[in-house]
Image (spheres, grey):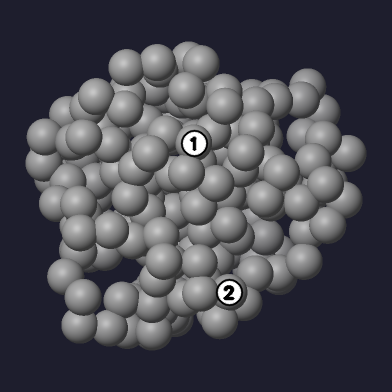
Amino acid sequence: MLFFDRVEAGRRLGSELARRLPRIRDEDPLVLAIPRGGVPVGYEVARVIDAPLDLFIARKLGAPGHEELGIGAVAPGGTRFLDAETIRMLGVSDAYIEEVTRRETAELERRLRRFRGDRPPPRIEGRAVVLVDDGLATGVTALASLTALRLQRPRRLVFAAPVCSLEGMQAVARQADDVVCVATPDRFFGVGAWYQDFTQTTDEEVVKLLTPATSSRT
């Protein structure tokens, strides 16, 4: 195991981010966590670099019968990223892709209502934006999120996660200005394999962490 839990992982990730990008505190930084598991990690990263915390909600499109394997992802604003190679390799039908897109878009909208309510989204343009998750496997969720965020013209767009697959890191590096990972194991096994405690983060925990962490600077 690399990390005891997401709190420890977030603290170590925050330290690595500050070491790799020492001037980021001067770039009007904003930490955006991908819920749910990315929120406790992002909370700790935001504390380390003295940045406000908010959410960026994206949803992975899981493969038929293997939902943990991403064939794509959806993000706010109608952004959808599809992994054409994986779709072709698995023989996934267009009908399945449209059905899973509808389902995950509905869940994305539910989470937006649950976590954000009437609160407006944070300003992205001109800021150093750090997108955080608890790990990076295929990279499809991160790629959809980064694609949507890039349209809002951030000054710097960073992806950060405690543990990343080599393939995922290489894919995300094509869209992000910087990619920060504490560890990139040669044999990945999945995100949860690197945590002693990988208990699912609840909606209630997300709301609790977000409320005190969000500041007027967002």
Residue located 21% across and 75% down the image = 119
Q: Secondary structure at mark 2?
A: helix
Residue 127 against residue 58 in the figure, above or below: above
Crowdedness near tag 1: few (<14), some (14–19) or many (≥20) residues, C-alpha within 10 Å: some
According to the picture, the residue beneath numbered tag 1 turns out to be 48
| Three-letter amino acid code of the residue under disc 1 | Val
Closer to us: 95 or 151: 151
Q: CA distance from mark 1 to mark 2?
A: 20 Å
Q: Which is closer to the viewer, label 1 or label 2? A: 1
**Residue 84 picture quarter:** top left
Q: Nearer the viewer, residue 93 or 58?
A: 58
Give x and y (percent) for residue 78.
22, 64
* Percent x, y of residue 104: 44, 75
The C terminus, quarter of image: bottom left
**Which residue is painted at 40% across and 17% down in the image?**
21
In the rendered view, does 125 fall on the left or right side of 138? Answer: left
172 relative to 55, above or below: above
Q: Mark 1 and mark 2 in contact? Answer it, CB < 8 Å.
A: no
Name the residue tied to disc 2: 205
